[in-house]
Amino acid sequence: MGLERALREAIRDGRLAAGARLPATRTLAAELGLSRGTVTAAYDQLIAEGHLVARQGSGTRIADTVTTRDAVTAPPRPDPRSAAVQRHTLRAGSPDITRFPTAVWLRAARKALDQAPSEAFGYGDPRGRIELRAALAGYLGRTRGVSAVPEQIVITTGVQQALALLGEVLTESGTTMIAMEDPYIPAFRDTVRASGPGVAPLPVDDDGARVDLLTTSDFDGIGAAVVTPSHQFPIGSTLSAVRRQHLADWARAGHLVIEDDYDGEFRYDRQPVGAIQGIAPDHVVYLGTASKTLGPGLRLAWMVLPPPLVGPVAEAKQLADHHSETLGQLTLAEMIASHAYDRHIRASRLRYRRRRDLLADRLTPRAGRPLTGFALSGIAAGLHALIRLEPVGLTEREVLSRASDYGLDIVGLSGMWLSTTTELHRPQGIVVGFGAPSERAYPAALDALVRALSWDSNGNRRN
């Protein structure tokens, strides 16, 4: 992002001196006209890279960027006389937007416009167009096991808006704390906080969120929990069958589960895992999005709500922006009804599986490629994987620095934690999004990733 890059460059060229204190996120956001979440995400990433340090009571400051250890281990920068460094990205969060189905979308839009009643272009139901809500009710039922009728669905501009609306509604009903997976997306945590409730960190391991902890005294007073059971972000684990049942039981006991099913359509080693909502529909809010299947620029997402929440959430949506944009809703409804959406997802799933396989192959050690000190995980589903860095290998900070030198944009795991556990006890890792690059750019991005992770045959960090 622009702020993150500008701060990084200012630190590197000395315009921001070591020890200098940065403004609070709220202050800087107001001064620059940005959202607080954007500023927080930039700070978190630079903290993960070691450019900034944050200490309770003293704010966020510029780190001492050159230490004795850095001087010994930092790789040399590319020769400036060589060809300009090409920029690559393996950031998680987006599909390959160069493969957006433009022709299919145009055909669906023409048909949708031809059939749309004139009232579709006026102010409408804050829940969204009935055409899309009806299409989604059927689609989610047959592909994700979601139990829904159109009246329970509210269309939003994204999962982030859905969390904001839910936070407002839950606050008004008396909910003061919401559990959210740790690690998770920092901007989403900020969204929930800004809407009212506090956030409690819910640990995650290789079996998904530790939902068994929700019944312990540490989580007394927690009214709701946000989880990503199909493919946890960013760890990549899938919630185990035992924990799925435990979570459903906790919900039925008078709590609310908010299920973020952001990339549930993409599973490569078996059939997609059904949604939690299907086993406890009266106690689960299901969140889905077109951002990963089509593109985030469409600003189309949806909530399936338990009946008591429909009215309050619809009212909050009306106050927020009246309703989401109409043409995109009508077009997506037509794509779903004609099964063009299913065909697009099937083709995308095959393409992303090939990318996943290529990533796994390129990171497999073999003769002439002494890749050690890390493990690849979370690759059974979704559009991202986690490279877990082992204590004997490169540090997260080193990998991020080397990746930057090789023109690769990736993010570290450190910036996604909420809990106050010391960094020494947190695993280090690199979150790799293999969906975003174009087909042409993907191999070069993997080349840069391999170089950033490589050691030479003598066990030294390879430049």
Image: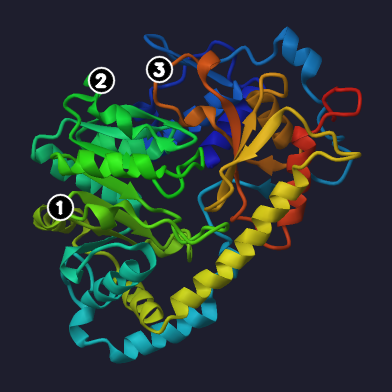
Q: Going 36% across and 41% down the picture, which residue do you hit? A: 242
Q: Going 88% across and 29% down the picture, which residue do you hit? A: 456
Give residue 304's mark: none
Mark nearest the camera among 3 and 1 is 3
**SS under mark 1:** helix
**SS under mark 2:** helix
Q: Which residue is mark 3?
A: 420
Mark nearest the camera among 2 and 3 is 2
> x, y percentage for residue 152?
18, 63
Q: Which residue is mark 2?
A: 218
Give residue 316's mark: 1
Q: Earlier in the sequence, mark 3 or mark 1?
A: 1
**SS under mark 3:** loop
Q: Residues within 10 Å of mark 2 (few under 14, many from 20)?
A: few
Q: Earlier in the sequence, mark 1 or mark 2?
A: 2
Residue 178 placement, left or right of 73: left
Q: CA distance from mark 2 to mark 3?
A: 15 Å
Query: Does 70 sit above or below residue 195?
Result: above
Identified by mark 3, the residue type is: Thr
